[in-house]
Image (cartoon, rainbow, N blue to C red):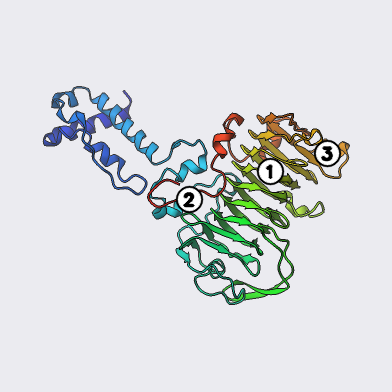
Amino acid sequence: MSDYRNGLALFVFLWILCFQSEATKSFGIFEKLKGPVLGRPAVVPETKHAQEPETKLVEDPEQVVEMVERSINSSRRELSYLSCGTGNPIDDCWRCDTDWENNRQRLADCAIGFGRNAIGGQNGRFYVVTDPNDDNPVNPRPGTLRHAVIQNEPLWITFQRDMVIQLKEELIMNSYKTIDGRGANVHIANGPCITVQYVKHVIIHGIHIHDCKPAGNAMVRDSPTHYGWRTVSDGDGVSIFGANNIWVDHCSLSSCTDGLIDAIRGSTAITISNNYMSQHDKVMLLGHSDDYTQDVNMQVTIAYNHFGKGLVQRMPRCRHGYFHVVNNDYTDWEMYAIGGSANPTINSQGNRFLAPSNEFSKEVTKRDDTPQNIWSHWNWRSDGDLMLNGAFFTQSGAASSSSYAKASSLAARPSSLVPSLTTNAGVLQCRAGSRC
C-alpha cells in the first residue's frame, strides 16, 4: 500500500474510533466531502448501510479508503469535471445546473478553443435590460441594451422579459461585457446590429440576431465619455473589428444584409460555437482582405455549429490566419461551404458535410481567384470528416499534423457524434428551476 493510502487509511481508522457514536451514519463523511454541488446545499440521504455492524467499518481500512476515493470521484462528476450527458464540452460544463439562473457567470468558465480566455463581464455587476427601445444612440436611457454595453466597468447583461430590440444605429460594445439572453426570448432585429470594435473580452450568448441592416452617417456613443461620427455600416449580425477574446455561443442568426458573423482587421482569439445559422448568403468572413496582412495572426475556432437551410457560401471564408473548423453540421449550401484566399491554414476535423443535390456544388471547398500552382501549397486538410451525398473536400499543402499546430484548439470528437453534439445549436429554451 502506498504512503498516501496508508496515511488516509490510518486517518479514517482513527476517526471511526474517536466517533463511535456516529458509526451508524457511515456515509456522513462522504457527504461532507462532496459539499454543495452546483449551488445546491449538500443533502445527507438515508442509506441501507446505516444498520451494518460497526466491526465491518474497521475490519478493512483499505476498503474504506477505496470508498472515500469513490465518493470524491462521484463529487467530481457532479461538479461537471466529467460530462453530464450531451458530449458537448461547453454544454456539459454548465447546462447540468438546474440553478443556472443564480449561477449565470459560471458560463464564462466554459469557453473552449481560441476564444477560451474570453471572460466577458465575469465578476462584474449584473445589469438587467428593462427597456427594448433605442431612441437616442448618443444619450441612451438607463435600462436599455445600448446603455448597458457602453459602460466602462465589467457587466453581465440579462433581460427582464422577452423583447425585440430594433436598433437605430449599430450597437457598439465596450470591453468586458456579456450579453446573456437565457431565460428570455430576445431578438436583435430589423435594424443595425452588434459591433465589437477595438475591444476585448466580449461574450454574446442566447440571442436571436436576424434581418440586420446597414445604418450610419450618424453620431453614436461607444462609452460614457465618448461619442463620434459613424459611417455607413455593412449590415452584419456581429461585426468583430480589431478585437480579441470574443466568444459567440448559442445564438440563432439569419437573413442579414452582409455577414452573419464577420471578423476582420487584426481580430483574434475568437470562438464561434453552438450557433444555428440559416437563410443567408455570405455567412462568415474571417480576414479583411488579401492585402491586409495583419490578419496573419488571426486564430478562430468554429465548433458545434449547425449550418442549416438556405445558406449559400462562406461557412467560413478565410484569409491569412489559422482556422479550426471542428464538429460542425453542414446540412445545406448552394455554392460551397469552406473557402478562402491569401494562404490561410484551415484544419477541418470531425465535421459532417451533406452536399446539396446540385451535381456542380458537391465540393466543400473553394479557393478564390487563385491558380492551383499557388493554392496547392496552402495547408488545408480534412481529418475525420464525414462526407455525405457526394460531398468532397479538396486538400492541399502539408500532410503532417505539425503544420496545423496553430490551427488546432481542441480535441475533435468522431464525426458520427456530430448530430448529438449540435442538436441544441442555436438559442436554448431556458426556464428558471430546470436545465436549459
Residue at image location 79% in from the left, 55% down from the top: 292
Q: What residue does disc 1 label?
A: 323
Secondary structure under tag 3 reads helix
Say which residue appears at 58% left-offset and 51% top-offset.
Answer: 251
**Is 228 drawn above or below residue 380 in the view shown?**
below
Q: Is residue 1 left or right of residue 340?
A: left
**The residue under label 1 is which amino acid type?**
Phe
Q: Is residue 123 left or right of residue 390?
A: left
Give the distance between the C-alpha atoms of the residues marked 2 and 1, in whole angstroms. Answer: 24 Å
- Side (left or right) of 72 relative to 207: left
Q: Which mark is residue 107?
A: 2
Tell me the quarter of the image containing the N terminus: top left
Which one is in front, 427 or 178? 427
First of labels 1, 3 by sequence position:
1
Asked if 348 appears above or below 200 in the picture, the reply is: above
**Looking at the picture, does residue 164 appear above or below residue 69?**
below
Q: Is residue 436 visible?
A: yes
Residue type of the residue flagged with mark 2:
Leu
Q: Amino acid at mark 3?
A: Trp
Q: Which residue is mark 3?
A: 375
Say which element carries label 1.
strand
Percent x, y of residue 179: 53, 59
- Is residue 283 shown to the viewer in this render? no
User: Looking at this view, is 354 or 175 the one in front?
Assistant: 354
Question: Where residue 252 appears, x then y in whole percent?
Answer: 59, 51
Instruction: Confirm or deny contact between disc 2 and disc 1 (CB under 8 A).
Output: no
Q: Secondary structure at mark 2?
A: helix
